[in-house]
Image (cartoon, rainbow, N blue to C red):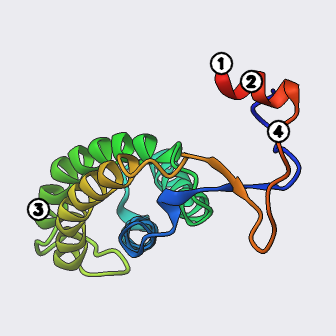
Amino acid sequence: MEATRVRPGYEVWRPNRESARNKATKALVALVLLISAALIAIIVFGGWERLQDTTMAVIALAWAALYVLFAYLVSRWSRGVLPVAASLAVILAIFAGVAAPAWFDRAKDGLSSPALPEEMLGLLTLLLIPVQIMLIVIAMVAFNQEWHIEEERPVEGGHAPPLDDEDAAADSA
Protein backbone atom coordinates (compact mmCIF):
# COMPACT_ATOMS: atom_id res chain seq x y z
CA MET A 1 0.00 0.00 0.00
CA GLU A 2 1.28 3.51 -0.83
CA ALA A 3 2.26 5.76 2.04
CA THR A 4 0.19 8.64 0.68
CA ARG A 5 -3.03 6.71 0.10
CA VAL A 6 -5.59 6.37 2.87
CA ARG A 7 -7.81 3.30 2.87
CA PRO A 8 -11.53 3.85 2.35
CA GLY A 9 -13.32 4.37 5.66
CA TYR A 10 -10.20 5.73 7.34
CA GLU A 11 -8.76 9.20 7.84
CA VAL A 12 -5.29 10.56 8.54
CA TRP A 13 -4.84 11.52 12.18
CA ARG A 14 -1.91 13.45 13.62
CA PRO A 15 -2.01 12.71 17.36
CA ASN A 16 0.96 14.92 18.30
CA ARG A 17 -0.76 18.04 17.00
CA GLU A 18 -3.75 17.81 19.32
CA SER A 19 -2.22 18.40 22.75
CA ALA A 20 -2.39 21.86 24.28
CA ARG A 21 1.33 21.70 25.04
CA ASN A 22 2.25 21.18 21.40
CA LYS A 23 -0.13 23.91 20.23
CA ALA A 24 1.36 26.32 22.77
CA THR A 25 4.90 25.44 21.68
CA LYS A 26 3.99 26.03 18.04
CA ALA A 27 2.50 29.42 18.89
CA LEU A 28 5.53 30.33 21.01
CA VAL A 29 7.99 29.47 18.24
CA ALA A 30 6.03 31.60 15.77
CA LEU A 31 5.85 34.47 18.26
CA VAL A 32 9.59 34.43 18.99
CA LEU A 33 10.32 34.33 15.26
CA LEU A 34 8.11 37.38 14.71
CA ILE A 35 9.68 39.23 17.66
CA SER A 36 13.13 38.49 16.22
CA ALA A 37 12.08 39.77 12.81
CA ALA A 38 10.67 42.95 14.35
CA LEU A 39 13.86 43.58 16.35
CA ILE A 40 16.01 43.10 13.25
CA ALA A 41 13.83 45.50 11.24
CA ILE A 42 13.86 48.16 13.98
CA ILE A 43 17.65 47.97 14.30
CA VAL A 44 18.19 48.15 10.56
CA PHE A 45 15.76 50.99 9.89
CA GLY A 46 16.79 52.86 13.04
CA GLY A 47 20.46 52.78 12.13
CA TRP A 48 20.25 52.73 8.33
CA GLU A 49 22.21 55.98 7.85
CA ARG A 50 25.13 54.73 9.95
CA LEU A 51 25.38 51.15 8.80
CA GLN A 52 28.76 50.58 7.18
CA ASP A 53 27.41 48.70 4.20
CA THR A 54 24.00 48.82 2.54
CA THR A 55 24.45 45.21 1.47
CA MET A 56 24.46 44.09 5.10
CA ALA A 57 21.28 46.05 5.75
CA VAL A 58 19.58 44.28 2.86
CA ILE A 59 20.82 40.91 4.13
CA ALA A 60 19.48 41.72 7.61
CA LEU A 61 16.10 42.62 6.15
CA ALA A 62 16.11 39.38 4.14
CA TRP A 63 16.90 37.56 7.40
CA ALA A 64 13.88 39.22 9.02
CA ALA A 65 11.70 38.25 6.05
CA LEU A 66 12.96 34.68 6.34
CA TYR A 67 11.96 34.63 10.01
CA VAL A 68 8.47 35.84 9.06
CA LEU A 69 8.24 33.06 6.46
CA PHE A 70 9.39 30.52 9.07
CA ALA A 71 6.72 31.79 11.49
CA TYR A 72 4.10 31.21 8.81
CA LEU A 73 5.39 27.71 8.08
CA VAL A 74 5.53 26.80 11.76
CA SER A 75 1.96 28.00 12.18
CA ARG A 76 1.06 25.44 9.49
CA TRP A 77 2.79 22.66 11.52
CA SER A 78 5.91 22.47 9.34
CA ARG A 79 8.63 21.19 11.61
CA GLY A 80 11.31 21.07 8.92
CA VAL A 81 12.16 24.76 9.34
CA LEU A 82 12.76 24.44 13.08
CA PRO A 83 16.41 23.27 12.91
CA VAL A 84 17.10 25.86 10.20
CA ALA A 85 15.62 28.61 12.37
CA ALA A 86 17.70 27.42 15.34
CA SER A 87 20.92 27.42 13.32
CA LEU A 88 20.19 30.89 11.93
CA ALA A 89 19.50 32.04 15.50
CA VAL A 90 22.97 30.86 16.57
CA ILE A 91 24.58 32.89 13.80
CA LEU A 92 22.44 35.95 14.53
CA ALA A 93 23.25 35.80 18.24
CA ILE A 94 26.95 35.84 17.38
CA PHE A 95 26.48 38.78 14.99
CA ALA A 96 24.50 40.67 17.64
CA GLY A 97 27.17 40.05 20.26
CA VAL A 98 29.80 41.50 17.94
CA ALA A 99 27.68 44.43 16.72
CA ALA A 100 26.24 45.73 20.02
CA PRO A 101 29.43 47.37 21.36
CA ALA A 102 29.84 49.31 18.10
CA TRP A 103 26.48 51.03 18.64
CA PHE A 104 27.52 52.08 22.15
CA ASP A 105 30.87 53.33 20.84
CA ARG A 106 29.06 55.69 18.45
CA ALA A 107 27.34 57.52 21.33
CA LYS A 108 29.95 60.30 21.40
CA ASP A 109 29.98 64.00 20.65
CA GLY A 110 31.03 64.85 17.12
CA LEU A 111 29.53 61.76 15.48
CA SER A 112 26.29 62.10 13.58
CA SER A 113 23.40 60.17 15.07
CA PRO A 114 21.18 57.69 13.24
CA ALA A 115 17.38 57.88 13.31
CA LEU A 116 17.24 56.13 16.71
CA PRO A 117 19.68 56.94 19.53
CA GLU A 118 22.82 54.81 19.53
CA GLU A 119 22.17 53.60 23.08
CA MET A 120 18.75 52.32 22.07
CA LEU A 121 20.15 50.53 19.02
CA GLY A 122 22.85 48.97 21.18
CA LEU A 123 20.28 47.88 23.75
CA LEU A 124 18.02 46.39 21.07
CA THR A 125 21.00 44.58 19.59
CA LEU A 126 21.88 43.17 23.01
CA LEU A 127 18.23 42.20 23.51
CA LEU A 128 18.43 40.21 20.30
CA ILE A 129 20.89 37.77 21.93
CA PRO A 130 18.56 36.30 24.62
CA VAL A 131 15.69 36.28 22.13
CA GLN A 132 17.80 34.14 19.78
CA ILE A 133 18.79 31.82 22.63
CA MET A 134 15.11 31.46 23.48
CA LEU A 135 14.37 30.70 19.82
CA ILE A 136 17.02 27.98 19.74
CA VAL A 137 15.66 26.26 22.85
CA ILE A 138 11.98 26.51 21.91
CA ALA A 139 12.60 25.40 18.30
CA MET A 140 14.44 22.30 19.46
CA VAL A 141 11.72 21.46 22.00
CA ALA A 142 9.15 21.81 19.22
CA PHE A 143 11.23 19.67 16.87
CA ASN A 144 11.26 16.86 19.44
CA GLN A 145 7.46 16.90 19.71
CA GLU A 146 7.24 14.97 16.43
CA TRP A 147 4.47 16.92 14.74
CA HIS A 148 4.94 14.83 11.59
CA ILE A 149 3.58 11.53 13.00
CA GLU A 150 0.52 10.35 11.08
CA GLU A 151 -1.79 7.44 11.79
CA GLU A 152 -4.85 6.02 10.12
CA ARG A 153 -8.02 5.75 12.13
CA PRO A 154 -11.57 4.83 11.20
CA VAL A 155 -13.72 7.76 10.16
CA GLU A 156 -15.82 8.89 13.12
CA GLY A 157 -19.47 7.88 13.10
CA GLY A 158 -18.91 4.81 10.99
CA HIS A 159 -17.29 1.46 11.07
CA ALA A 160 -14.21 0.73 9.08
CA PRO A 161 -14.82 -1.71 6.27
CA PRO A 162 -13.06 -5.05 6.55
CA LEU A 163 -9.58 -5.21 5.07
CA ASP A 164 -9.25 -6.70 1.62
CA ASP A 165 -6.42 -9.12 0.86
CA GLU A 166 -4.06 -6.41 -0.44
CA ASP A 167 -4.53 -4.19 2.66
CA ALA A 168 -4.23 -7.14 5.05
CA ALA A 169 -0.94 -8.16 3.41
CA ALA A 170 0.39 -4.59 3.64
CA ASP A 171 -0.62 -4.30 7.33
CA SER A 172 1.01 -7.58 8.30
CA ALA A 173 4.30 -6.67 6.55
Q: Nearer the viewer, mark 3 or mark 2?
A: 2
Q: In the image, which disc is placed on residue 173? A: 1
Badge 2 crowding class, 10 Å Cα cut-off, few under 14, some 14 to 19, many 20 or more, is few
Up-down: is 117 above or below 148? below
Q: Are marks 2 and 1 in contact (CB under 8 Å)?
A: yes
> What's the CA distance linking mark 4 and mark 2?
10 Å
> What's the CA distance linking mark 3 and mark 1?
67 Å
Q: In the image, which disc is placed on residue 105? A: 3
Residue 77 at x, y = what percent? 57, 58
> What's the CA distance linking mark 3 and mark 2?
68 Å
Q: What residue is disc 2 on?
A: 170
Residue 156 at x, y = what percent? 74, 70
Residue 32 at x, y = what percent? 37, 69
> What's the CA distance linking mark 1 and mark 4?
14 Å
Q: Nearer the viewer, mark 4 or mark 2?
A: 4
Q: Are marks 3 and 2 in contact (CB under 8 Å)?
A: no
In the figure, is residue 40 to the left or right of 97? right
Badge 1 crowding class, 10 Å Cα cut-off, few under 14, some 14 to 19, many 20 or more, is few
Of the numbered discs 1 and 4, the one sitting upstream in the chain is 4
Badge 4 crowding class, 10 Å Cα cut-off, few under 14, some 14 to 19, many 20 or more, is few
Give the residue at the far top of this rendering. 173
Quadrant into which the N terminus falls:
top right
Element class at badge 2: helix
Name the foreground residue: 163 vs 70.
Answer: 163
Residue 129 in sight from this viewpoint = yes
Q: What residue is disc 4 on?
A: 163
Up-down: is 118 above or below 173? below
Of the numbered discs 3 and 1, the one sitting upstream in the chain is 3
In the figure, is residue 157 to the left or right of 36? right
Please name the amino acid that badge 2 sits on.
Answer: Ala
Q: State which quadrant residue 88 falls in.
A: top left
